[in-house]
Amino acid sequence: MNVIIVFPKMEHGRYIRRILQQNGFEVNAVCTTGAQALQHANELSGGIVICGYRFADMLYTELYEYLPQQFEMLLIASAAVCSSRERQKNRKEIVCLKMPLMVHELVRSMHMMSDSFLRKKKCCRGKKERTDEENKLLSEAKALLMERNHMTEEEAHRYLQKRSMDNGTGIVETAQMVLSIMG
């Protein structure tokens, strides 16, 4: 998990880094400007940016707008800023922690965001195009289920999907099992 910290005062960023490192997080960079954070973000494959409200060169909203899509943001700001964010319906994707910062809230938020990020990354990585052979196996398994169990094609497909999820296997592997057991 890549972590970039951005605060206008370097000592604030170092304090956050120390807390995160003590709780098992690795920090890739501590920056004082949005431009520095963007430079580091463009070199990484995604992660979390932890930042304050305002930097010398931009506001957090501008930084969020320019960040690569694979990055999430954790804003640490005053209660007034966090409250105004909650009223903005279009900015739910930025997590906001109110000042004064509670260490356990920061760590809990980082674990939550980290888990969410890893789930999204795993989900997106798992989607790939099937080969012709895999599509043929799926079609044969569906045809067999349709013939023997009097299912529609949609019902047969849902059956394969459900069995693959229940067994923790891919749908193609499930189709192979159906063919070997029923065929």
Image: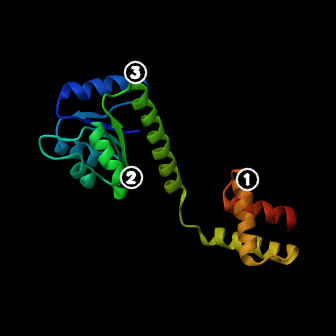
> How much space separates mark 1 and mark 2, taking CA atoms?
32 Å
Between circles 1 and 2, the one closer to the viewer is 2
Horizontal arrangement in the rendering, residue 85 relative to residue 157 (left or right): left
Q: In which quarter of the image is the C terminus?
A: bottom right
How far apart are the alpha carbons under marks 3 and 1?
38 Å
| Label 3 secondary element | helix
Q: Where is residue 171 in the image (x, y as percent from the top left)?
A: 68, 61
For disc 1, the neighbor class at 10 Å (few under 14, some 14 to 19, many from 20) is few
Q: Which amino acid does label 2 sit on?
A: Lys
Give neighbour class at mark 3: few <14, some 14-19, many 20+ (Cα, 10 Å): few
Residue 40: image location, x then y, percent: 25, 42
Which residue is the site of mark 1? Answer: 166
Which structural element holds mark 1?
Answer: helix
**Badge count:** 3
Residue 27 % position (x, y): 33, 32
Say which quarter of the image contains residue 9: top left
Q: Earlier in the sequence, mark 3 or mark 1?
A: 3
Q: Which of marks 1 and 2 is nearer the N terminus?
A: 2
